[in-house]
Image (tube, coloured by chain):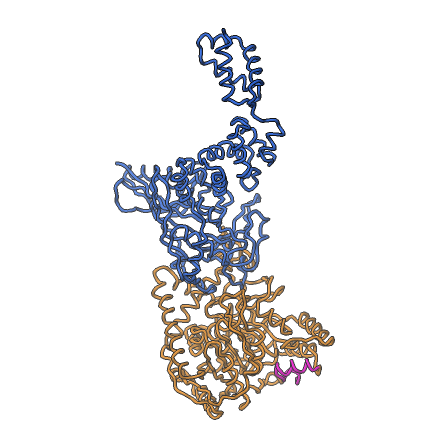
Amino acid sequence: MDYEVVIGMEVHVELKTESKAFCGCSTAFGAAPNTHVCPVCLGLPGVLPVLNRKAVEHAVRVGLALGCEISAFSKFDRKNYFYPDMPKNYQISQYDKPLTSTGRLPILVDGAIREIRIRRAHLEEDAGKLLHLDDGTTGVDFNRAGVPLLEIVSEPDLHSADEAVEYLLRLKTLLEYLGVSDCNMEEGSMRCEANVDVRPTGGGPIGDIVEIKNVASITGVKRAIEFEFERQRDLLEMGGTVKRETRRWNPDSARTTVMRTKELAHDYRYFPEPDLVPVVLDRETIERMRETLPELPLARQLRYMNEHGLSEYDSGVLTAQQAAADFYESCARLYGQPKVVCNWVMGELFRLMKERRVGFDTLQVTPTALVDMLKLIDNGTISGTIGKTVIEAMFATGLPPDRIVVDRGLMQISDTAELEKTITAVLEANSKPVADYRGGNEKTFGFLVGQVMRATKGKANPKLVNELLRKALDTGGE
Amino acid sequence: MSLLEQSLSDAAKAVRAGTVSSTELTRAALDAIERLDPTLRAYISVDADGALARAAQLDARRGKGEPLGLLGGVPVAIKDNMVVRGGATTCASRILDGFVSPYDATVIERLREAGAVFLGKTNMDEFAMGSSTENSAVAATRNPWDTGRVPGGSSGGSAAAVAARMAFGALGSDTGGSIRQPASFCGVTGLKPTYGRVSRYGLVAFASSLDQIGTFSRDGRDAALLLGAIAGHDPRDSTSVKETVPDYGAALDGGVAGLRVGMPAEYFGEGISAETEQAVRAAIAKLNDLGAEVVEVSLPHLDYAVATYYIICTAEASSNLARYDGVRYGRRLDGEGVHDMYRASREAGFGAEVKRRILLGTYVLSAGYYDAYYLKALKVRTLIKADFDRAFEHVDCIAAPTSPTTAFRLGEKLDDPLTMYLLDIYTISVNLAGLPGISVPCGFDQAGLPIGLQLIGKPFDEPTLLRAAHAYQQATDWQRRVPPIVDGGA
């Protein structure tokens, strides 16, 4: 029997706000433990939460970008559970009236768009962090307690680990475009839980779902789902049943292990948070926010495919990062010939950025400079090969390309007399290949071109070299 | 003794005029505390040094001709569920042993601004849960009129302190009658403002949607003064309202002529003592004599108020009190692992009444019971609010007894929580509806115990309540009577 997997994702992202969800403390990552805390986020006796408007705005922007309904009236609830890193022993969250619901996230699967339904995206506060110390005791760092979180819950619309990965990458890109989160999984600002159910292909009701908690990387999600698919399939094939339980992914052993079973499921005793008033948004505000949304990554990718003639792969890479797409697009606008721009950006520029670990925020090459360099190639000032040298110098110094070309004497040699002199020297130094060529071995021609280019440090006009070399070889033998 | 006989308003005036110093007033109050409090146990902690230092500072300011604020250096007491920076706040619970607040409650900031001197923190039922101040982990406070009786609760310490002239005024909190009922039992004026009128920031929460800070004072004039000092919007409390604060002092005068006073038939039925009923009816007749028109009104959902209240307040309390787990502050007991540590700390830290309410609240919020209890209670709460809305279409305020009986004996009802809960029947619905209410002394029973008249107002209409209270107190003198213990009697 064949089996299929049905996956729903729950993604928590920390929203990029200056201050926490319910107090004025900083949300900056990496500070010394318990330095970004106040009576409110520590839940001291007598404190009250005050909602951060910016967190609501971010959540609404995400909702709008996901095509969700934005609630004109939403409220906060308390989710009660005891945990040492929860200062109040309840979490302020949204239960039955979330800020946004019923949307979709389009993903590209085998070149076709598939819409993954979004059940809801709601606001809540993050908890603190337990620090297990060397002496065997446990400390709590509350810096993270109260940082605004957006929980984005999908419907069980994903059918493979690869689709889940595509969903996460698409979501991550979207959130980065909206500027609402860093989505940094290492720093914990994006955290995933996958609900995985395996069943015989072609239907059957959704069985008992296994929840895989807090996987720390996208690769981890992929491997955890793959492991879970095999585990559940093997269980079913042996006539067993899958229990509803929560499992933890262990990257070292590459397995999931039981965290808690249904018997221990929590009763969170949700009830409306009495310390906060409901969030009321009028239609006008929502519409105004809709107008400020940027062009979303998938739309941008499709535009590059349709209007710029780029491949799915190229357009996908360029739009995965908003800054990369912005850079590419500025160049393309200044230069035309999007495919040429794409090749240079994805080729030389990305290679250098990756090698030297430079991001767009510190990149010294401007779109204008890159385009100026391309024009130098077009007007014959430099060759394409030299272009690579020039871009490397631009990358290191931030100087304009024409200045680099002049300073380093990289102008293309198109002087016939000078080239002829070099060719003569090359022919003299390579009598064997010359004889081979004249003996009918066409292949050695390329070698001789290379020798000329080398002798001129790549500056020779390749077209002219070809022409002159051919002439010299064809006539010189007489 | 004469220094302490005067009202807060008069004392503040005297300090401003320079006829008495803040230090003299403070010292007199501290002397009274030293003399009476070993018997009455109204205070949990007294900050004599802090109070005298503050008084000296205010006197120095006055000496330089600087303004002292509305309260002019007069000493007051604070219920021990409001936090004061650098000082202990215990809520009369062992679980907060050793907790020192790093911040001031908004009301504390505002009272400081107004030039108050803080004498100390007053006793209460643990986490404000109770109607007698017997549920305190520290001691049971005694009623100044009869030390064999309770002062009422949960703000019994504040009520007793003001009644026994151990403070010129005090702050309390009222979740289901916890200001008005002890005010009634102790023969002082207790005001619970509209929900949202006074910031709750820094008030240790019992039931957030019902809790409100209010005042204890000798009379309506002092209540107006204190309320004016603490009222107003606070950006740190989302439920505090952006309404402007009226001049409560100016609102006192004008009498009650033409005022329509509602008398709810349901408040004079079963359970009320004959003496209480008689005194309250006489007080309402007095308002009538003064020119008010008395109209019968009906609040038909009164019978459901107590049940509704105990579902909502225990639900919220079970959640609000979850933070006391021994992890970050307060009392911690060892245990095997974290859950055992929680269990041991909470078992030892909370008293019986608090545990009872946490269990009840956990139960009514549990999956499967939520709809039957909590959700139903919210619906009844709406009906109770609607009762008042309907009544206020016809009247300007409602007059009723504050409590069905006068102060009962210590221990008399301690083993019967349900009977105790029923004693709040006349005050609870005001909290469920979020309305302002005031209790003023309106007589004494055969045993010499005070009886309270409760006036209930429209939202944010504290001025009408204060005006009616003031008019009544101008025409009577119940509020001037002093418990015998104050002069060395009893």
Residue closest to the eye, B291 or A378: A378
Per the image, is B3 magenta?
Answer: yes
Is residue A228 at least partly visible in the picture? no
Is residue A146 at least partly visible in the picture? yes
In the visual, does A114 lie left or right of A250? left
For chain B, give the colour. orange
Which quadrant would the N terminus of chain B be assigned to in this image?
Answer: bottom right
In the visual, does B431 lie left or right of B159? left
Q: Which residues are magenta?
A: B1-17
Residue closest to the eye, B13 or B282: B13
From the top left corner, tell me how far across and down residue A208 is, in percent.
32, 47
Instruction: Name the residue at the right extreme.
Output: B64
Residue B360 occupies quadrant: bottom left
Q: Looking at the image, is A2 positioned above or below residue A265?
A: above
For chain A, give the colour. blue
Residue closest to the eye, B490 or A105: A105
From the top left corner, tell me how far across and down residue A204 is, in percent.
26, 44
Q: Main secondary structure of the magenta part?
A: helix
Residue closest to the eye, A70 or A470: A470
Q: Looking at the image, is B419 positioned above or below residue B290?
A: above
Q: How many marks?
A: 0
In the visual, does B97 lie left or right of A225? right
Residue A78 occupies quadrant: bottom left
Q: Looking at the image, is B246 positioned above or below residue A162?
A: below
From the top left corner, tell me how far across and down residue B123 is, in percent.
56, 72
Per the image, is B37 magenta?
Answer: no
From the top left corner, tell me how far across and down residue B64 is, in percent.
74, 75
In the visual, does B72 lie left or right of B391? right
Which quadrant would the C terminus of chain B be assigned to in this image?
Answer: bottom right
